[in-house]
Amino acid sequence: MSHPSFDLTGVTAAVTGASRGIGLAMADALAGAGADVIAVASSPFLRDSPAERAVTAHGRAFTGLHADFSDVAAVSALGDRLADAGITVLVNNAGTIERAPAAVHPVESWNRVLAVDLTSHFVLTQKVGARMLDKGYGKVIFTASLLSFQGGINVPGYAAAKSGIAGLTHALSNEWVGQGVTVNAIAPGYIATDNTQALQDDPDRSRSILDRIPAGRWGRPADLGGATVFLASPASDYVSGVVLPVDGGWLAR
């Protein structure tokens, strides 16, 4: 029997970037703990999508929405819709990454990554968080990164955005936790997803990464599920302003 503090029955959770990878795994974990899920992605969900199958397999309700996370107006409209849906848990996971050395990194790439990975998170959370504050309870979870702590290579926009996510987590927590809304972030380590495919395909880089992970393997999207349920549940009601690494021990190395 599951511990009641981790039970999300009756909760509606919204997960952005939920069509694949980490976001899909987060939606699956939340549904497994009892939550109904509103999944959001940059493209429309097709009928019987992997996200829909994952959520409904747990007997939970699924709603699929789409939005352009680089468009502030579209994200603001999404925020209004999610606020009206009365969600208790908001998982800000949508993101993108563009790789090029800093000296030649196109400013267009910089702007797009900052828009998707940072600005959209603030705009969406501002809208949904205001409604949570009115209710006196809510859970906001951001997807941060190891690059919230480190600089990375050839991804200056991504590193800046994810450092910004850590700062935003702290700032919103300072303002909101006293009113019943916790704000935390999960910092995945090197997870085998589409975003890290270029690293996985580079034998030298992949080996150097693997050699530094004490757990001895790349992470899997499902490895983020437990942390997501914890931060979404009453078990974490006194936890706020935390950037929680799920990295196989990378940062401790």
Image (cartoon, helix red, strand yellow):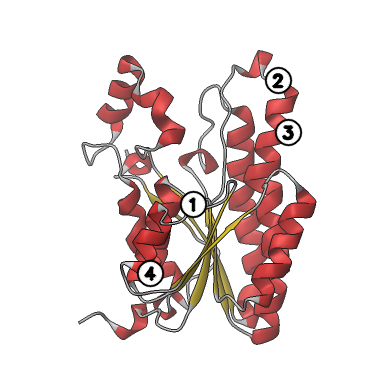
Q: Are marks 2 and 3 in contact (CB under 8 Å)?
A: no
Q: Amino acid at mark 4?
A: Ala
Cα separation between marks 2 and 3? 9 Å
The residue under the point 70% across, 56% down is 122
- Say what amino acid the circle numbered 1 marks: Leu
The residues tagged by marks 4 and 3 sit, at their Cα atoms, a distance apart of: 34 Å
Question: In which quadrant is the C terminus drawn?
Answer: top left
- Whether 2 is drawn above or below 98: the answer is below
Which callout, 2 or 1, points to the residue nearer the camera? 1
Q: Is residue 45 left or right of residue 42?
A: left
Calculate the distance from the C-alpha at mark 1 to the C-alpha at mark 3: 29 Å
Mark yes or no: residue 175 visible: no
Q: Is residue 217 above or below residue 2?
A: above
Q: Which residue is mark 1?
A: 46
**Considering only vertical position in the picture, is 64 above or below 93?**
below
Q: Position of residue 109 (x, y in %)?
A: 68, 27
Across and down, in percent, residue 249 comes to: 30, 44
Tell me the quarter of the picture where residue 163 sits.
top right
Q: Residue furthest toward the front?
A: 47
Rounded to the nearest angstrom, the CA distance separating label 2 from label 1 is 33 Å
The residue wearing badge 3 is: 111
Badge 4 is on which residue?
31
What type is the residue that disc 2 sits on?
Answer: Pro
| Residue 65 or residue 198, whichever sits in front | 65
Task: Choose between 246 and 24: the one closer to the eye.
Answer: 24
Q: Secondary structure at mark 3?
A: helix
- Residue plotted at (65% across, 78% down): 132
Compare marks 1 and 3 and give the one earlier in the sequence: 1
Q: Is residue 2 left or right of residue 144?
A: left
In the image, taking residue 9 as reference, residue 43 lies left or right, namely right
Q: If you read the primary sequence from the N terminus, does the residue marked by circle 2 or circle 3 appear first?
A: 2
